[in-house]
Image (spheres, grey):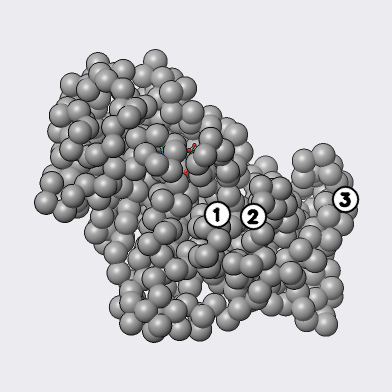
Amino acid sequence: MTKIDVLLGLQWGDEGKGKIVDVLTPGYDVIARFQGGPNAGHTLEFNGMKHVLHIIPSGIFHKDKINLIGNGVLIEPAIFRQEIEELSAKGVDATRNLYISKKAHLILPTHRMMDAANEQARGSAVGDRKGANVPSWGAKIGSTLKGIGPAYTDKIARNGIRVGDILAADFADRYRQLKNQHVLMATAMGFDVSVFRIGELTLDQYEEQWMQSLDCLKRFRFVNSEYFINQCLRDDKKVLAEGAQAMMLDIDFGTYPFVTSSNTITAGVCTGLGVAPSTIGKVMGITKAYCTRVGAGPFPTQLDDETGRLLCELGHEYGATTGRPRRCGWIDLPALRYACMINGVTDLFVTKPDVMNDFDTVKMCTSYCIDGRHTDEIPYEYNTADVRPELTAFEGWKQSLAGITSYNALPERLKAFLAEIEQQTGVRIAAVSISPDRKDVLFKCVNA
Ligand code: GDP
Ligand code: IMO
Ligand code: MG
């Protein structure tokens, strides 16, 4: 019996999960998403082409690998169909190797409406300040508005509709009932349903598209994925669980309420796929060499200056799902240590040091000062306290990383920066990524 390996984000998302999963896929038989939904945007680049995936696992470009959408994931059929059509236009027929759990929940058009209604109902306080005095309440979350919060709410409230229900005789009734409930709730909240739009479409127009998209979904193999995955492990097949969002957006341990609505952490693999904790193998955690956040919430190392602007421009830090500019700052070691602790990270992957190639100085936050006190921990008052990063400066490596093909050949100053990350987290770096392209991942020898 093999164990299931996990790859997940250790910051606030967009660390490069899609790219690394794509690179690791040849070593696995099955790639499985276990949580999240179309709020994710995972970018893959190879052969001069860029691909962005939202619901479909990042192993899909490898024809001989099975990709599984697990029970913990949310599926929005119209977005799913669009993704399938985009893949098809690139010559990828996902019907052959994409399986879907019957227990995955559906995002209805009115879940997306409820997302907008909830955001509207929140106050107008600014939630994206650097780290001090972010109000916990009264500020908008900065949701991707894909219906994630409301769909998980219905799942937990036992009102949700699952993929397997699409085939049930009473599907239309159940859909109508849930939709009506959402319309009543939105109206009671003072939300004007008649002016709500998804893109250019009214709710009715979008609903028509959504209903038609169910036919696309039905072309896929619906499975009891918990049996499927456990059988794979018994058959010594290698399974990789692909995280979406990231540690600091976890519903329990992230910067609540500025989080997503699922367990993004290793524990989420067990509930999102139906595997026992004892089956978890390697936990690969991914971090950028700096830090970004899109949406509201605290971010102590955020740089509101020229350096922050440079990180955004040179790193092309614009959301893969919403196109919003990402907030940028230095890498945050207290947050990274917390992430390694909660997730049991065994291997670190570091991406995007190349973005800082021209920097004279590169910094790292190693602890915080909160109201005059020094701490290494993420405090409960993370949102509201005046959390100041204590920074250590490193001399920049001031050279291009293009063409470097081995970890050892990286500039010594970059290796010193990476060694400090290992030292500070107590976790070994397995590999460093130095460009968006599939080929630019440098694995570190075990003894290096
Ligand atoms: P994910 O959500 O974690 O899969 O990450 P995203 O795809 O949202 O964002 C990561 C962005 O960084 C994408 O545009 C990637 O193409 C790009 N990227 C990934 N690794 C590297 C790297 O090592 N260097 C650079 N410059 N870009 C990278
Ligand atoms: P990937 O998988 C970055 C953020 C949103 C918002 C908060 C809640 O690409 O790393 P939601 O739509 O879940 O209600 O939004 O979480 N968020 C992400 N930020 N990367 C993501 O996914 C994200 N998914 C959600 O910006 O602040
Ligand atoms: Mg992303």
Image coordinates of residue 268 in percent, x first then y, are 43, 66
* Quarter where residue 8 is shown: bottom left
Return the residue at label 2: 92
Return the residue at label 3: 205
- Above or below residue 176? Residue 398 is above
What residue is drawn where x is 11% and y is 51%? 447
Please rate how many residues cluster around mark 1, counting C-alpha atoms within 10 Å: few if below 14, some from 14 to 19, many from 20.
many
Image coordinates of residue 126 in percent, x first then y, are 52, 32
Is residue 328 visible in the rendered image? The answer is yes
- Above or below residue 44? Residue 412 is above
What residue is drawn where x is 51% and y is 65%? 65
Query: What element does badge 2 sit on?
Result: loop
Return the residue at label 1: 61
Please rate how many residues cluster around mark 2, counting C-alpha atoms within 10 Å: few if below 14, some from 14 to 19, many from 20.
some
Ligand 1 within 8 Å of disc 2? The answer is: no
Please state which amino acid type lies under the numbered disc 2: Val
Q: Mark 3 and mark 2: span between their CA atoms? A: 29 Å
* Quarter where residue 301 is shown: top left
- Above or below residue 357? Residue 134 is below
Please state which amino acid type lies under the numbered disc 3: Gln
Compare residues 377 and 276 and report the one nearer the observer.
276
